[in-house]
Amino acid sequence: MTLLAGGTVDQKSFYDALDIDLKSIATTIAANSENGRQKEGSLLPVDKLLNVIRKSLSDTYGTSSSAIKRIEEVFAGYDIDNSSSINKRDLTRAFLALKVNILDEEVDSLFNKFGNDSLDSLNYRKFMNVLNLVQVEDTKGKNI
């Protein structure tokens, strides 16, 4: 991975390091445009949206602790200041990288429900808990 000035990484290198296919992201965007959910009034309620996100993530990555760690790494990749929080734009990008079809309006709904209004951010670690995507620790404090 090539570091740029200031210790940053360009987006393609970041995706390559996480083994994310940019073509699949473009396909996800195209599918999202064609799936009919962009029609007015067709947004999912938050509880159903969470179920769709859970299913999409488990179908794509599984439910093992290594899969959950990979999902968290994608969210963390957009957390520039290491605050465990990301903004709407970066949450949308993270979902695209994770191959989750989600509309901007649905991201808005998630932020309205789980975000911090004053900071315009969402704590992705807490959000992963809402999705039941948490690593289980054994009695010695190691992830299993």
Image: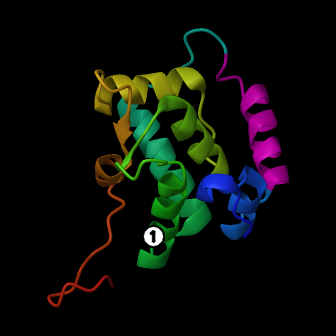
Whether 62 is drawn above or below 49: the answer is below
Q: Nearer the viewer, residue 128 or 78?
A: 78
> In this figure, which residue is indicated by the disc labeled 1?
69
Answer with left or right where residue 36 lies relative to residue 48.
Answer: right
Q: Residue at x 50, y 43 (%)?
A: 52
Q: Percent position (x, y) of residue 116?
A: 29, 29
Q: Residue at x 58, y 45 (%)?
A: 95
Whether 93 is drawn above or below 73: the answer is above
Name of the residue lying farthest toward the left: 139
Residue 35 seen in this snapshot = yes
**Helix, strand or loop status at disc 1:** helix
Disc 1 marks a residue whose amino acid type is Lys
Residue 23 covered by magenta stretch: yes
Q: Residue at x 67, y 57 (%)?
A: 9
Magenta-highlighted residues: 22-38
Q: Percent position (x, y) of residue 60?
A: 61, 62
Per the picture, the main secondary structure of the magenta-coloured stretch is: helix
Whether 69 is drawn above or below 42: the answer is below
